[in-house]
Amino acid sequence: MVAPNAAWHNSMYNNRALVPDYMDYLQRWAQDSAQVRANCPCALDLAYGPEAGETLDVFPATRPGAALAPVPVFIHGGYWRSLDKSDHSFVAPGLRDLGACVVVVNYALCPGTETQAVTVPDIALQMAHATAWVWRHIAAHGGDRSNITVIGHSAGGHLAAMLLGCDWKKVGRDLPAGLVRKTMSISGLFDLEPVRKTPFVQGDLRITPAHVRMASPAKWQRPRNGVLYTVVGGDESPEFLRHNRLIHQAWGPKTVPVCEDLPGLNHFSVVTELTRAGSRLNALAKTLIQQKPA
């Protein structure tokens, strides 16, 4: 068998090439997101750290004055190098309809600047700091800090899995060891080695063998506590389907009790299913968000 070459890796991982109308999705997300921010109560661009890009948006639950609401934290995709939280405000209304206080986070993008490089492990640490901010401050927005669910798409799905394995005491001594026990990865990537060999992104990501070891959840021992739901669009590339199975095999069914391919969905349309009432993905999100952490 011939080893996969650069062209093969590009063909497996370039989702924009695989979905010719991808720009229609991105434009619709941006338009819908702008309408959400204009029409829904929200607190925008709250700083969770001192660096540029370390901001998040909060969309409080729809029932003010009620009991503290569960808190889904959404992490966007874009291969750690593109897109923005402002492109993903559209996820908030559907999740708020589940009785949640929604947080959509930003992060610095690879490769960074001439004076400040950004790597995938750097972004994973930013997401830990963002989630720590949520735990410390979300009660002021009506959120229940003891009931956080992290949901991510693509690169964000990778980051969600990273947070399930985070050593929170190293992030902050005031943080509970089980700060994140519920995560969902939508079309996530769990082994950075093939991404390192993919030319169209590696120029920006600059993934090293050390990064692969440090930031590939499929290469870790399974987290002691918590669950990860994984889904992928059934029409995605064989590699994205493989990654979905890979983390289930690596961490086992106790930690990954849901591992599903969703028929008829591509890398972009799968995200819109998250907030479509009655969809399989929306039902999974509802179960996870409304479930009290073990």
Image (cartoon, grey):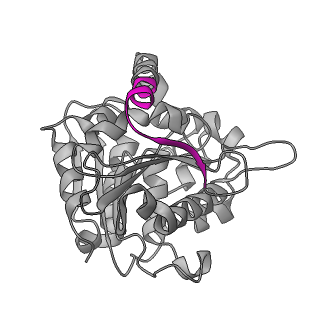
Relative vertical location of residue 176 with respect to residue 31 in this rendering, above or below:
below
Left or right of 58 on screen, residue 225 = left
Q: Is residue 40 magenta?
A: yes
Residue projecting furthest to the left: 278
Left or right of 105 on screen, residue 18 = left
Q: Residue at x 54, y 33 (%)?
A: 10
Location of residue 119 in the rendering, given as x and y in whole percent from the top left corner: 69, 53
Q: Residue at x 48, y 25 (%)?
A: 16
Question: What segment is highlighted magenta in the picture?
Answer: 33-47
Location of residue 147 in the rendering, given as x and y in whole percent from the top left corner: 32, 67
The answer, for residue 124, to whether it is visible in the render is yes
**Quarter residue 79 falls in:** top right
Q: How many numbered dots are placed on residues in this image? A: 0
Location of residue 129 in the rendering, given as x and y in whole percent from the top left corner: 59, 64
Residue projecting furthest to the front: 65
The one nearer the camera, 8 or 247, is 247
Relative vertical location of residue 116 with respect to residue 89 in this rendering, above or below:
below
**Quarter residue 84 falls in:** top right
Q: Is residue 277 magenta?
A: no
